[in-house]
Image (tube, rainbow, N blue to C red):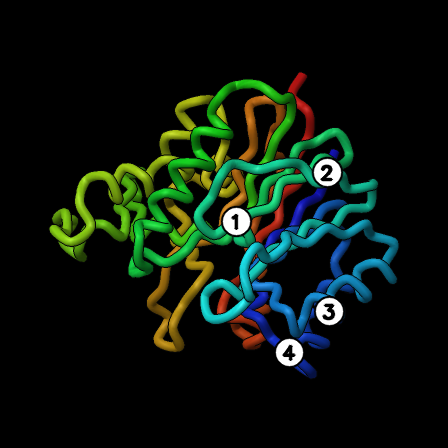
Amino acid sequence: MALLLTWNVAGRVGPNQERQIAALAERELDLLCLQEVTPRTKTRWIEALEARGLHVAVSPWPVEPRGSRRLAVLIASRAPVEALPGPDLPWSERHLAARTAGIEVHTLHAPLSSKDDLVKVRTLEALFAALADGGGGPRVLAGDLNTPRYESREGEIVTFARDRRGRLREERGERHDRAELMLVDELTRHGWRDAFRALHGYARRDRSWAMRTGFGYRLDHIIASPELEPVEADYVHEWREERLSDHSAMWARLEPRP
């Protein structure tokens, strides 16, 4: 059994980072995935998590960490963490794969749709290809996937390639639409489970990123391979509501399937 928590910590620094560390210290967990770790916050995150007895790995920056390329990701675990080679991604610092506690863990912070050179599309396509091959034993994907735009109560999923009325946006196109569906929809057709939807269905209208008006999207996910069964899962919305981050954290308890 593994209790996993994922959180986009929004690059918070100084006292705000310390508030995040204190909040996490109150939660029991076996595995932790963080997104938006920056050069300014990396050392403090490693220090704080190792003080809890966790093993930590952070994705390396292949280029100078500036602008959108300053955001890395982190995996921490009570068991030793073995970093694994990942797929060829345009912004490789946004993804990290590691084997720990008998599970292959992937964490991803997908780029925004508006970024140039189809970096979001290429990222989602490459990671989907790596995960959908059906091999490798128990695996889990956790992180800020920056999709979908909308999920209906009937289970229809609408991407950011479409407008508010569901019409395909010409500047995005069909490839962008397909790419955004790969991890949150197509992967489940390969036996993977969206932990939150598997346990709560589509009646819950949770938003893991929201404006102060309350309008937002469910961008943060935990998706488990067929070898794992989500038995509990939910969001920690109070951390977003307390402005520790602009994202809610998400957690899931996973068990091996018999």
- x, y percent for residue 2: 72, 38
Above or below for 131 versus 117: above
- x, y percent for residue 228: 62, 27
Q: Amino acid at mark 2?
A: Ala
Label 3: which residue?
A: 21
Q: Amino acid at mark 1?
A: Ser
Q: Is residue 232 left or right of residue 159?
A: right
Q: Is residue 57 left or right of residue 137?
A: right
Q: Nearer the viewer, mark 4 or mark 2?
A: 4
Label 4: which residue?
A: 13
Point out the tag, 4 or 3, that comes first from the N-terminus.
4
Q: Amino acid at mark 4?
A: Val
Neighbour tally class for label 2: few under 14, some 14-19, many 20 plus, Cα within 10 Å: some
Measured Cα–Cα span from mark 1 to mark 3: 25 Å
- x, y percent for residue 112: 36, 58
* In-front residue for pair 122/9: 122
- x, y percent for residue 212: 40, 77
- Residues at marks 4 and 2 touching, judged by CB atoms closer than 8 Å: no
Measured Cα–Cα span from mark 4 to mark 1: 23 Å
